[in-house]
Amino acid sequence: MKSLRSVGFMLLILVLSACARPTGTSTPSDLPLMTLTPAGEGQEVLETVQPQLAADLGLSAEALTPVSIEPQEWPDTSLGCPQPDQMYAQVIVPGWRMTFRDAEGKVYEVHTDQSGKQYVVCGVPGSLEPDDPVELRGRMAVAEHFNVPESEVQLLSSEAVEWPDSCLGCAAPNVMCLMVITPGYRLIYQVGDQKVEVHTNQDGSAVTLCNAPDLPAGGTGHSITDKAFSSALNFVLNEFPGYGLPAEPWQAQDVTPTGLLGGVRYRYTSDLWAFEVQCPLVERPLCDVSLLHTKAGRVWRGVVETDGSVRTGDGRPQLSFKVTPCDQNAGVPATGGSLQADVQNGQLLITQSIAYVCCADIQVALGWDGETRTIKLIETNTGEVCRCMCSYPMQAAMTSLLSGTYRLEVWGVQKLDAGHPLELLHALEIQIP
């Protein structure tokens, strides 16, 4: 009877091996399917361990699939899995190293003695320790969602899994997912009295919060677009203070088109400004980001890398400018300001008289729409607001302009908290030879 069971078991192994998905690189949750020694002793040990392990885990024996088994000599009686503050006899212990996978994809590594009567579940291959780079990305995503310090986010458990799609088993509404097996991790965190389930891919470049509650203030988008938006916002705030963007709050809205497959698009708005972020649902996404104004249209476009670095795109010209302090003796232009534009040696030179309050600190930023070849000077008061008015002379130069026709627009002067939105001050056509 035992030899019949042996033959049947080996036939099962051959069938399973034939059905195994080929892989070029072994991952923690993509292990080689069942490697048994030629002798039947390994089979007997496995038959001993499998029902005992299933009972310990509260599963049926059929719910555990054998993945691999190999003989092993353990260096002491801990069976290669010592516990803190425990003493073990330093003797060689022959035994076996086995792995099993349950129905959810979780993998268990089991160390046994020679007979299989003594065994220990030594861990989950690929499970994460606190402060692992992938775990840190998951913790950061939870902290950002709840707007709390990362120190208040506690890792409860982690396990290696194979997600059935590119959405990591947690698709957002109206988002199309690629049906591809994606190795990754399931992380459980605690924030206050909330437990949050986080799904990641294998390197943590994609992170999804599966059961986090929506927050009443600010809101969040998809985890991938949230990261890209945060990187783009910080980049623009540092590089282009003349846009006068608010640091917060920004509201997220899912604007993913119905026909967009394998991608997601979110719009983040604050007052009259908006970022549109579109990302593919892949392991290492490159996200396209545009900054738009309700009246002025698109002023900036860039690409956010997986690591959060930002590249400005679509042939943007270079701007240098100087705003002379307010000259109260010069008076205020009757028309509210003047503009002169000249082309010299391939450069666009602009001279403007800006009529505005006399206590202002005016910053200028270049807005650019490469598709329409529209140059937009965005002027913002980053200083104070007072009752007196005067004239601010401004000189600007633009380089890296290719030959052709451009539209030049001057928008100003913005001071949102004082009720001064951007208005179109001047517009004209420019020809670069």
Image (tube, rainbow, N blue to C red):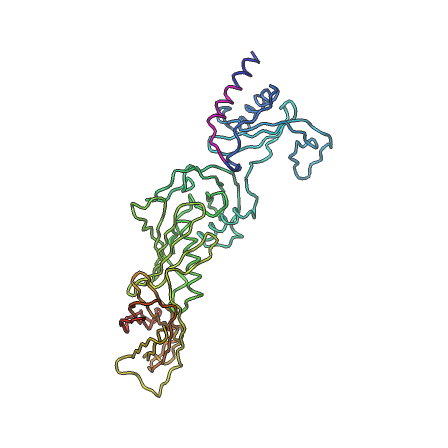
Tell me if 93 is positioned left or right of 366 in this view: right
Q: Residue at x 53, y 42 (%)?
A: 156
The prevailing secondary structure element of the residues shown in magenta is helix
Q: Residue furthest front?
A: 433
Location of residue 313 (image quadrant): bottom left
Magenta stretch: includes residue 140: no
Visible residue check, residue 217: no
Position of 293 relative to 335 (above/below): above
Q: Which residues are magenta?
A: 10-23
Number of numbered labels in the structure image: 0
Q: Residue furthest bottom?
A: 329
Where's the C terminus, which quadrant? bottom left
- Please give the name of the residue rendered at 45% of the width and 39% of the height, measured from the top-left corner: 182
Q: Is residue 312 visible to us here? A: yes
Q: Residue 46 appears at what percent x and percent y? A: 58, 23
Q: Residue furthest right?
A: 90
Nearer to me, 373 or 28: 373
Name the residue rendered at 54%, 16% in the picture: 7
Q: Is residue 11 magenta?
A: yes
Q: Position of residue 19 (x, y in %)?
A: 46, 27
Considering every residue shown, the one lying at the far top of the view is 1
**Nearer to me, 254 or 377:** 377
**Residue 328 placed where, x, y %?**
36, 86
Q: Residue 82 appears at what percent x and percent y?
A: 66, 36
In this view, 281 is above or below 218: above
**Residue 49 placement: quadrant:** top right
- Left or right? Give the position of 376 relative to 1: left
Q: Split into 4 quadrants, where in the image is the N terminus?
A: top right
